[in-house]
Amino acid sequence: MPELHPTNLREVCNDSYFSFESTADVEPISGIIGQARAVRSLEFGLEIQNLGFNIYVAGSSGTGRLTAINSFITQHAKIKGPASDWCYVQNFTNPINPIALELPSGTGAQFRSDMRILVDEIVSRLAKTFESEDYHRHRDTIAQNFVRQRDELLSNLQNEANQNGLSIQSTPMGLSISPMDEDAQSSTVQTDTKPQNQIRGQLEDQLKQLVNQVRNAERITNNHVKEMDRQIILGSIEPSISELEEKYSSVPKVKQYLTDVQTDMTSNVNLFRSNPQDTQAQAKIPASQEGDDPFRRYDINLIVDNSQSDGAPVILEVNPTVSNLIGIIEKESRFGSLLTDFTLIRPGALHRANGGYLIIRIEDLVSKPGAWDSLKHCLKERSVLLEESPDRMNLLGTKGLTPKSIPLDVKTILIGDVAHYQILYANDPVFLELFKVKAEFDDVMDRSQENIIEFASFVSMLCSKEGLQHVSRDGLCKLVEESSRISEDQMKLSTRFAEISDLIREANYWSKKDGSSLIQSKHVNQAQKEKRDRSDLVRDKVLDMINREILSIDTESDSVGQINGLAVTGLGDLKFGKPNRITVSVSTGKEGFIDIERESNLGGRFHTKGVMILGGYISDKLAYNFPMAISARITFEQSYNEVDGDSASSAELYAILSRLSGLPINQGIAVTGSVNQMGKVQPIGGVNDKIEGFFHVCQNRGLTGMQGVLIPSSNVQHLMLSEEVVDAVAKGTFHIYSTETIDEGIEILTGVKAGNRLADGSFEPSSVNDLASQTLRIMSLDMRDFLSGSTSNLN
């Protein structure tokens, strides 16, 4: 019989791979392990600069995609060089459209500091100037000249009015001409008043002209004062502005901004008066806009500062809301309203990543309302346009901004699973335009010597980074073997490094408890055992129910039409193999093969397909030359959950053959594997858990030496069984059989030859196939006789 040798059951790692005693002597890994295809895709995507060649990194969680990508891109970013600084400044012409300024990397903070120093110096200097005696003397001289000129004009007109019995009076309505004698003012004698009225009219005309002259003189005087103040401010700020213009001459927009600052300062003289209470009232700036600081308009809102960057920025956005991606315009409560200005613009991840790289998890992105659409818009337009937050746009009293957009040059890397990629690829045309590069991370890598050495480098990196004890050679071998078990392949290593890392952390705990300076194989074993014990409550309850025969599983006798199939149960972090009794009953009839699971709505599509394949095999193999007249009912006993998958189809077929041939099956051998219509046994998943699940059932009841599991030959390469099972096989108390065909399998289960087809179409006498075929032929004849008898009775 094709029984497997213990060496076939687990691919042991030979410590001859390692020339070191522990991972302390190994150089920590700095790149990505075992993902050559993905690395090539990443390098291509990062280096090509054409529009739309952003990257989607696909793969399962736990493979270390995010950590590896972040590290890989960070190294690549150092080559690219630092990105520009960005700031928003006041638009003095249209304050609701703040201006964006781009500065060389590291100069943004310096420019902000220079502007603060400039404003402080100018404010201090002008405050002293406007408080000086010299200034007040000049201003008083101008004012006195105006007063003297005004008084002289008024005095001349007053004298002329007095000579004619009239006087210039000041009233609430302004200056007016009135008689000096009030009795004469009330006189109604026309002949006496007519000459005075004519003179009065002439004087009133002169008074109007005089008022206009005074107003013109006052306007000229004020203009002289303003011009004097303007010249004072200009003389004070021009050297400082010129110095900054020279310093930032390589940035034309900064030079233009400094020119605008100079124009605005000279236009708002009263900003620099020493009395701050009067500053805003007299200046052209509304207090509601500038808050308590009238010089806030000259601030520099530095939204991106790359002065501390070592290369291009690499931004990982873990909460990609719209605000966190494209920024937000905050608001302050002033005078009962929500108001804002350019200093309240806050950057988003796209601003910070501009000129570099932005990394986002796709599941986080698509779960945030509007975030995916906002990102697509920015990438497509190659600019970041900040807009008002939608939840604040309609608030009463809200005053908004529309900042100038910032050109965007960013390589975006989305990290997600293959399912998200397929959904976006099929349903979002813009996704195809923007993410032309796919870098797919595999769950496994070849178990080559090179990859095993890199695996050791990964372990070294983890231990060094997290302060864990290093791993000895035998401990490392155990980790390599566990990695192959996770991948369910003797020739592969798993790239689910999160799971490996957790095992190392737990082994580190037991190593310290043991007082060891290194993590050894026994500590890895203990970590595995303790982890199973924490999670195996449900499994232990199932084993207890089997032992107490609450769940009927026979592991010793021989039975006809009955077999133990194997399934894997997964509950969160718990996964274990569990045997299920499969039974078959047959009778003459027309129904064919009846899947009771499907009929009771407990069978999935794949299981139904597997049952239908059985009919194809039976009719082709055993009844190709006569019509079948069979009703075979197949069921999983004591199964109350949905059954899906075709991994039990070979077991179901063996049970059918047993029922048809009347030959009992050894219940101590459980079976797994799917089957095709040609009788080839095909591989299935979870083979290690299935074998170990049945082993534990037999172990609890007591190993008899006659028990074991029958698996497809193609699954032998996937065996990474626990050392406990391997030892039992080595001692002969448990057996693992492999088979390529149903004929081979039925011989193992019944101990009877399957039987080859002879020249006349029959099978070798007394073989399984012969007995089963004869039963089918008898059932066909019985059906013919029954139908024939029924017809004659009807006549």
Image: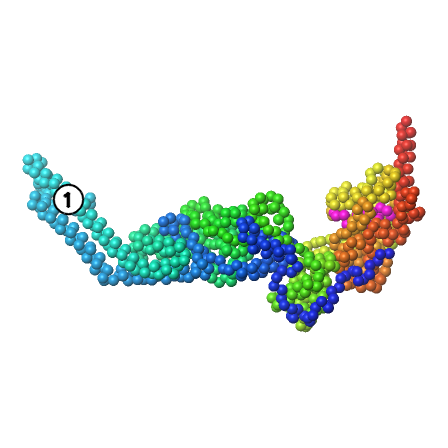
Judge whether residue 291 can be spotted in this image.
no
Check the image and name the residue furthest to the left: 192
Identify the residue shown where x is 56% and y is 55%.
47
| Badge 1 density bin: few <14, some 14–19, many ≥20, Cα 10 Å | many
Magenta span includes 657: yes
Identify the residue shown where x is 41% and y is 58%.
250
* Residue where numbered disc 1 is placed: 207
Q: In the figure, 164 relative to 122: above or below?
A: above
**What is the x, y in percent for residue 168?**
13, 46
**What is the x, y in percent for residue 121?**
33, 62
Identify the residue shown where x is 44% and y is 55%.
102
Left or right, residue 500 beside residue 153: right
- Total residue callouts: 1
For the C terminus, the image quarter is: top right
Magenta span includes 591: no
For the N terminus, the image quarter is: bottom right
Judge whether residue 422 can be spotted in this image.
yes
Give the residues drawn in magenta, as a range: 643-658
Tag 1, which secondary structure? helix
**What is the x, y in percent for residue 639?**
77, 48
Identify the residue shown where x is 88% and y is 38%.
626
Q: In the figure, 748 relative to 449: above or below?
A: above
